[in-house]
Amino acid sequence: MGYDYDDQNIFAKILRGEIPNDTVYEDDFALAFRDIQPQAPDHVLVIPKGPYVNQDHFAAEATDAEIVGFTRAIGKVCAAMGVTPGAGGMGYRMIANAGEAGVQEVPHLHVHILSGRMLGRMVKRFD
Ligand code: AMP
């Protein structure tokens, strides 16, 4: 199984500093920035710094340190957004689209964190 990472994707350009972003959080493993077309009052994307296409690529090929670092970074982003339910925040939804059926537009793993409004049910019935 091969993963073909395109280093010209827009998030790779953001990581290289070639395109500006509205940063919310950054550490050695992750960068979080506001989505340019927000679908909720709070809509932040969290991306790993390594070159991974999607979650299954990341799970298969990232180091343990990268996986731990990225996972912890997501928690820190939620805390920075003030949405952590256990800390009095209103909660959030975390989405990672992959491939065609997931309608993934940017081929660099990213987790959407959505909050700031009631988000409704996750997906509609399909029948
Ligand atoms: P997805 O469909 O999961 O691949 O989502 C890609 C997301 O990236 C969309 O919500 C876009 O609005 C967002 N996006 C695309 N370009 C940028 C950018 N330059 N800065 C911030 N968000 C972006």
Image: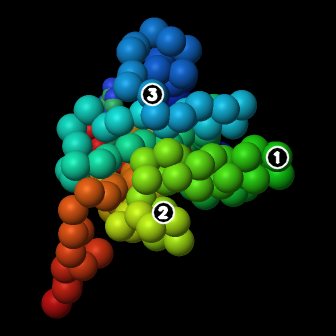
In x, y percent, where is residue 115?
A: 31, 58
Give the quarter of the figure containing the C terminus: bottom left
Does the CB distance between marks 3 and 1 fall below 8 Å? no
- Identity of the amino acid at label 3? Thr
Q: The residue tagged with tag 1: helix, strand or loop?
A: helix
Residue position marked by numbered label 1 in the rendering: 65
Query: How is colour applied across the structure in the image?
Result: rainbow
Query: Is 49 positioned to the left or the right of 33 in the image?
Result: right
Left or right of residue 19: residue 65: right
* Quadrant hosting ligand 1: top left
Left or right: 120 with respect to 110? left
Q: Position of residue 109 (x, y in %)?
A: 52, 44
Q: Amino acid at mark 1?
A: Ala
Circle 3 is placed at which residue position?
23
Residue at x 21%, y 75% (from the top left corner): 120
Alpha carbon distance from label 2 to label 1: 24 Å
Label 3 CB less than 8 angstroms from ligand 1: no
Residue 21 picture location, percent across and down: 39, 22
In the rendered image, residue 125, in percent from the top left (x then y), is placed at: 19, 85
Work out whether residue 82 can be spotted.
yes
N-terminal label among 2 and 1: 1
Q: Is residue 41 above or below residue 88?
A: above
Apparent side of residue 124 relative to residue 77 in the rendered image (left or right): left
